[in-house]
Amino acid sequence: MKRLAGVEGPLRRAILVTAFVLGVTTAAPAEESLSELQVKAQHGDAVAQFNLGGKYYIGQGVTQDYAEAVKWWRKAADQGHARAQYLLGAAYATGEGVTQDYAGAVTWYRKAAEQGDADAQLYLGSMYDNGQGVAQDYAEAAKWYRRAADQGRVRAQFILGLMYDNGDGVTQDFTEAAKWYRKAAEQGNPRAQFNLGWLYTNGQGVAQDYVEGVKWFRKAADQGNASAQFNLGLMYANGYGVSRDYAEAVKWYRKAANQGYARAQSNLGTMYSNGQGVPQDYLLAYMWFNVAASKLSEADRANAVKGSAQAARKLTPVELLRAEQMARDWKPSTLGGE
């Protein structure tokens, strides 16, 4: 199960820049000039080498040059500078300024991780988790995720919760899963919030509590998590943990449906077909059933196809053509509405 594999696009850059900024704010005088920094770096000052590498990476006062950044980070890393070791590992993992080399990333992540760098611990765990640069080893992954989680890294807390939830590298333990999900959820991680809501709804690792389940689903749903939006819709539709409210169910189904969540789309079709929470509208019911059908599992697809056929019988030939066109034209959106 891939969890924190390669970090793509802008997030890669954000990780490296954040790490550099943290290093600068804690290790270098703000008034230090570039020329002073270069002199210190050239004379072997590890902190200066680390900061000079960061300047080359983000193009601060110099022409942006990833290879030059890597050069200076390597010099600092060779002197044991943990943050430089982490960034060098990240450079190898992303292939920025150096040929991508997962084994090289593991080497440098490990050096920093063993010095207690939480981000390096997180990403070393990821390398073991996904078998990148090392043989896949969930137990070793869990070990490093735990070290990062103990230092408050939200993603490590969430992933450690997931490992206890699934029994990957650790003995399956829903109580431990709930513990780590809660730590991440309280720091705002939407996936942890959703998973914690799921545990409360099903009474796994915690006493079953629909109200608490709704609370965590809502937190994740408010951040745009489609699974949480769908489940919150279910809670309103069935009156679990909240008063039954079909209009609220439709609201949350629609948010998930507009993101492409097929089960929400099918349920939205049902709400339109039955006139629950919305005026009865067979045209929209047909559209949503058809948008959902190709993406659903076999059992759920059969229900959507049946609903679609029932809605079709209520439409005129012209309305049916229009509904079919609407289904073909539909595209995901996070803006809400129809």
Image: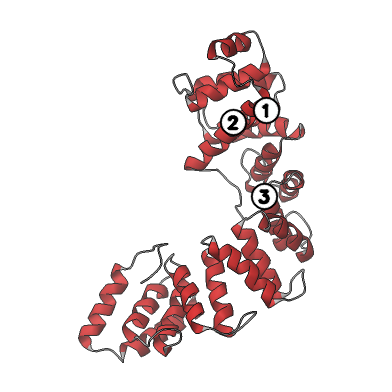
Label 3: which secondary element: helix
Residue highlighted by disc 2: 21
Q: Earlier in the sequence, mark 3 or mark 2?
A: 2
Position of 289 relative to 84 (above/below): below
Is 207 on the left or on the right of 292, as rendered?
right
Residue highlighted by disc 1: 26
Mark drawn on residue 154:
3
Mark drawn on residue 106:
none
Residue 24 picture quarter: top right
Q: Earlier in the sequence, mark 2 or mark 1?
A: 2
Q: Earlier in the sequence, mark 3 or mark 1?
A: 1
Is 12 on the left or on the right of 320, as rendered?
right
Q: How many marks?
A: 3
Label 1: which secondary element: helix
Position of 32 relative to 111 (above/below): above
Q: Position of residue 298 (x, y in %)?
A: 48, 77
**C-alpha distance separating marks 2 and 1:** 9 Å
Q: Residue drawn 53% across and 23% down?
A: 55
**C-alpha distance separating marks 3 and 2:** 19 Å
Q: Quadrant location of the N terminus?
A: bottom right
**C-alpha distance separating marks 3 and 1:** 22 Å
Residue at the extreme left: 318
Disc 3 marks which amino acid? Val
Q: Residue drawn 62% across and 65% down?
A: 194
Q: Position of residue 99 (x, y in %)?
A: 51, 28
